[in-house]
Image (cartoon, grey):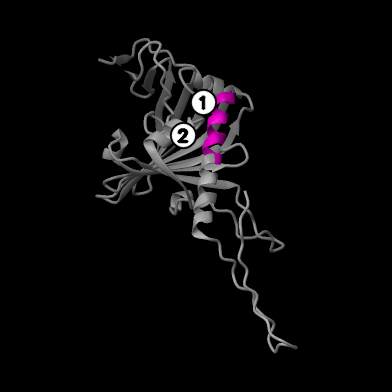
Amino acid sequence: MNTLLLVLLLGCQGEPAVPPAPVAPVVPAAQTESAAQESVDAILDGMEAQGRTMKDFTASASMEKFESLTDEREIRRGRVVVVGPSGAQRHIAIIFDETIDSSGRGSTDSRRFIYSAGWLTEFDLARKQAIRRQLARAGEVFDPLRVGEGAFPVPLGQPKADVLREFTATVAPLPDAPFFKSLTPPSSDAKGVAAASTLVALRLVPRAGTPMARDTAAIVMVLERPLLAPRAVEVEAVNGDRTRVLLRNGTLNAGLEEWARALLEAPSTEGWKVDSRPME
């Protein structure tokens, strides 16, 4: 990519009393927009390629739900495991084992979610209850992580054409929220050298007339270079409510540890109350 930089240098004949100060380079607006679009295309191309080669992803997960009307928030903490490339081959497990309410009180949680073969099952281990929801019919291609369609806002391997069909995409700053403060690197290291962030954010705004436009104002995805592994997601509802997901200690295509394999295995529901909800 060639970028024309117009630099104005101020000087005069002879010895100046004050050293000339450089003026900030001016970049034509059209070139700035072109560079931004190239960045969006490069990120989406990378995410699509990631989906074709992905084997597994694991991370610690925190989710914050904020209600604008009551100014209340709830935080859940747990872990997430994703196996398989995008599409019908995906197998996902999420467990939340801690909940913190608006007053700051913490409590243990025992909910676990497993998606496999078109079915999402919620296991309540304490109450011995399970709810099975069919999200896709047998043989139907469905990705529970797909932005704007899936049940989990964890952007892995999103098809570029699908994203651009449903959203307008722009490069964005990192979300400004206390929940995401760990994403901001220190301004410099111990020697005063400026720290460079490896994070990049995309802001997706639903296109008019799409199903998501009814309830969703925008989605911001934060990815970590060079693998474009997901680090955070913020979903802003039309009514001002926000759902934020923060991922830590993420590993991509590094193989599954024992805890991750165990999480993918559904617990026995013998003697449980099971509510099965197939698609109509």
User: Mark 1 = which residue?
Assistant: 82
User: What amino acid does circle 2 point to?
Assistant: Val
Position of 55 with respect to 280 (left or right) is right
Kindly state the secondary structure of the residue where label 1 is placed: strand
Residues drawn in magenta: 42-55
Q: Position of residue 123 (x, y in %)?
A: 38, 22
All told, the count of numbered labels is 2
User: What amino acid does circle 1 point to?
Assistant: Val
Q: Magenta part mainly helix, strand or loop?
A: helix
As for residue 49 lying within the magenta part, the answer is yes
Q: Identify which residue is drawn at 63% across, 40% down.
A: 226
As for residue 230 lying within the magenta part, the answer is no
Q: Quadrant of residue 113?
A: top left
Q: Position of residue 223 (x, y in %)?
A: 53, 41
Q: Nearer the viewer, residue 248 or 207?
A: 207
Q: Residues within 10 Å of mark 1 (few under 14, many from 20)?
A: many
User: Mark 2 = which residue?
Assistant: 154
Q: Nearer the viewer, residue 178 or 124?
A: 178
Q: Are marks 1 and 2 in contact (CB under 8 Å)?
A: yes
Instruction: State the CA–CA distance, disc 1 to disc 2.
Output: 10 Å
